[in-house]
Image (spheres, rainbow, N blue to C red):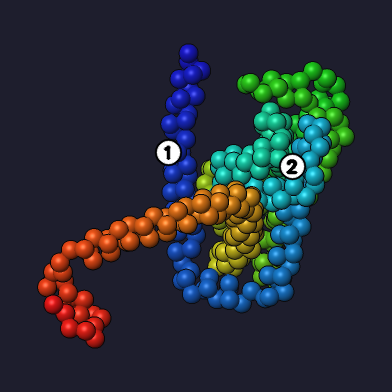
Amino acid sequence: MKGTKIIAIARRAGPMVTIGLFGIAMLVIHHELKLHPWSDIVAVVHDTAWSKIGAAVGLTAIGFVTLIGYDWLGFKYVQYNLLKRKIAFAGFIGYAFSQSLGQSLVSGGSVRLRLYSSWGVPLGDISRIFLFGWMTLYIGLIALGGFLLTVEAQNAAPFVHLPVDITRGIGIAMLVLLGSYLALSLRRKRPLQVRSIEFRVPSFRVSLLQVLLASIDLAIAGCVLYVLLPDGSPVSFPAFLAVYLIAVVAGSASQLPGGIGVIEGVMLTLLTPELSHASVFGALLVYRVVYTLGPLVLAACMLAGYELLERKTAWVQTSRTLRRTASWLIPNALAMSTFIAGVILLFSGATPGIQSRMEWIEFFLHLACPLL
């Protein structure tokens, strides 16, 4: 009973926490940018070289291929065969919505559920694929974050505002947690139970692929933003990537659409004063257009086109039904109207004409013969 009450309170408090985090993020952004006029940020965006934007677009394309790999690996995990082009289609649309709108199970998850279920994938397997993808992301965060905080502790510590030893200690703890998961995949044979969903522990090979795939995905996503920073940036890529991962975790926890505001606030707070506020925020704006808005627009068009094609068969069947109905209805309707018109003419010819009506007809038709 207590657990049920706690869950109910958490569900009610969730939206308020999200709104509160968004408000805090806006205050942080306002505080960080208050000394910089908007014209400085616009100038940074305007001066971004097309070569940088092209590189960001190319990296975004590669990044979404790795995102599609989450579902591809999930299908391998549940041992269900589905055409790769269908996995790629549903994966791209689903993750484009998730990356942009947040609430991944509600936005991108519902789209993938709609597509996969229409292709005959059992609901239980779809649930396991979703849970597997969610786990893969956080395994990648633990693996890549632990590696960076351990190996690059000297460079990352100033940006995370922690002593080097503590930074390295956190990284080692994350790597130990990752090692525990990999050991579990070697030793655990019985499935785990997550509420009503039975979750089979992935094999060691699949677990290694999870680590590799998610780490590459996160590194590419961070690289999209890094290439948009000004030339000669004093921030090394490993240190920048550590800050980016912190921002991603904060944005994911906020459940805001695309972590908007939260990611910007974290990046502005941790990357300055090494980089100017205007240059960081300008790069973030371009990043949002390239990595978030662009794929979302493309995915929406692809989904609309798919739905139109799916309904094409129903439209053809409806038009055929209408044609069959019309081929029977129109001749009969014309015959009936002709019969009624003939009856009216017969009665009209057998009865005296009404002067006002005959004058009305004369006005429009200008009959040659005189009327009554």
Specify the quadrant that holds the C terminus: bottom left
Question: Residue 109: x and y, percent?
Answer: 62, 41
- Mark 1 to mark 2: distance in Å? 32 Å
Amino acid type, residue under disc 2 in the picture: Asp
Q: Is residue 190 above or below residue 357?
A: above
Residue 125 in sight from this viewpoint: yes
Query: Could you say which is closer to the camera, residue 113 or residue 308?
Result: 308
Question: Residue 54: x and y, percent?
Answer: 71, 70
Residue in the picture at 28% in, 64% down: 345
Q: How many marks?
A: 2
Residue 269 in sight from this viewpoint: no
Q: Secondary structure at mark 2?
A: helix
Q: Is residue 153 above or below residue 50?
A: above
Classify 10 Å Cα crowding around label 2: few (below 14), some (14-19), many (20 and above): many
The answer to whether residue 113 is left or right of residue 372 is right
Q: Secondary structure at mark 1?
A: helix
Question: Residue 234: x and y, percent?
Answer: 70, 65
Q: Which residue is mark 1?
A: 16
Residue in the picture at 81% in, 29% down: 202
The answer to whether residue 240 is left or right of residue 355 is right
Residue in the picture at 12% in, 73% down: 355
Q: Earlier in the sequence, mark 1 or mark 2?
A: 1
Of the two numbered discs 1 and 2 in the rendering, the one whose residue sits closer to the viewer: 2
Amino acid type, residue under disc 1 in the picture: Met
Image quarter for residue 198?
A: top right
Q: Is residue 92 above or below residue 207?
A: below
Q: Which residue is mark 2?
A: 71
Residue in the picture at 81% in, 32% down: 79
The answer to whether residue 341 is left or right of residue 52 is left
Query: Could you say which is closer to the camera, residue 177 or residue 224?
Result: 224
